[in-house]
Amino acid sequence: MISNELIAIVGPALAAGLIIALTHAPLGLEVLKRGIIFIDLAIAQFAGLGVVAANIIWQEPVWWIVQSLALGFALLAALLFRCVEKKLPKEQEAIIGSSFVLAASIALLVLADRPHGGEEIQHLLSGQILFVTWRDVILHTPVYASILVLWFLRPDKARHSNWFYVLFAIAITSSVQLVGVYVVFASLILPALAAAPYKQKQLMAWICGITSILLGIFVSIVIDAPAGPVIVLAYAIVALSIRIAKKTLTKFMQLP
C-alpha cells in the first residue's frame, strides 16, 4: 500500500515536473534551433539570483516579492540577450555563457557569509522538487498554461524574438524556483536533442520529458537520493535511448 504521506509528496512533485516538461519541450526546440544553448543556464541563474536577493533583503519574504524579483532579474537578462542578438550575433553565445558564470559567481559571493549559504546554493542548483506543494503547483500552473496557449495558438507572435525572450524568462522564473537550475537546463535541451532526428520533433520532445520526469522521481524515491540530480540523469538516459532507437530503426528499415 502507498501511504498517504508518500502520495502527498509525490503528487505535487509529479504535477510540477510534468507541466514543466510540457512547457519546456517547445521552448527547448526553439533554443536549439536558434543555437543559443547556454541561454537556459544564464536566465535560470539570473532568476535564481533574484530569489537570493529577495531572501537577503527581506527575512522570509512573501511569495509575490520573491516572484517579482526573480522575474525582474530574468527579464533583465532576457533584454540583454535580445540586444546582444541584434548587435553582436556572432558573439552571442560567448556573452550568454559569460553572463551565466558572472551571475553564478555573484550568488556564491552573496551567500558565502550566510549560515546556510551552502544549502541555499545547493537548492538553487539542484532544486527541491519533492518539497513542492499543491499551493506551489496552483500558483505556477497558470504561467505555464498561458505560455503553452500563446505558443500554439499564436506561434507567429510567440516565436518572434521579442516575445520569445519574454516568454522564456517568465517560464524559467517559475521553473528555477520549483526544480532548480540543473533540471531547468536538462528539461529544455535534452528533449530537444532527443527529438532532433525525428520528423515529429514536438511529440518526441514531450515523450522524452514526460518519461524522464516519471522515471527520475520514481527512482529518486526508491533509492532515497536527491531528486534533482536523479531527474537530470533520467533525462540524459531517456534522451540517449530515444536517439539510439531512431538510429537502430533507420538501419533496420534500410536492410534488404
Image (cartoon, grey):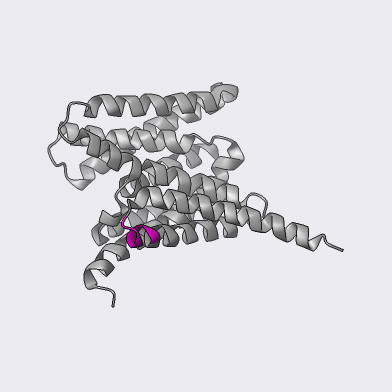
Q: Residue at x 45, y 43 (%)?
A: 185
Say whether residue 220 is left or right of residue 64. Answer: right
Tell me, yes or no, if residue 46 can be seen here: yes
Task: Look at the image and tell me in which quarter the N terminus lies.
Answer: bottom left
Left or right: 23 with respect to 124? right
Main SS class of the magenta portion in the image: helix
Rendered location of residue 53, percent (x, y): 23, 32
When the figure is inspected, residue 144 is found, relative to residue 50, above or below; the finding is below
Q: Is residue 201 above or below residue 85?
A: below
| Residue at the spot 61% in from the left edge and 52% down from the top edge | 195
**Quick one: 182 or 103, which is closer to the camera?**
182
Residue 119 spot, x, y in % from top left:
23, 39
Q: Which residue is painted at 77% across and 62% down in the image?
A: 252
Query: Which residues lie in the magenta part?
Result: 219-224
Query: Is 45 within the magenta?
Result: no
Screen quadrant of the C terminus? bottom right
Is 220 colored magenta in this rendering? yes
Q: Position of residue 200 (x, y in %)?
A: 64, 58
Instruction: Tell me: residue 94, above or below residue 202.
Output: above
Q: Is residue 70 left or right of residue 60?
A: right
Q: Residue at x 53, y 55 (%)?
A: 238
Q: Residue furthest front?
A: 223
Examine the image and state in which quarter residue 104 appears: top left
Q: Residue furthest bottom?
A: 1
Residue 135 drawn at (x, y percent): 24, 59
Q: Quadrant of residue 54?
A: top left
**Can the viewer see residue 158 in this picture?**
no
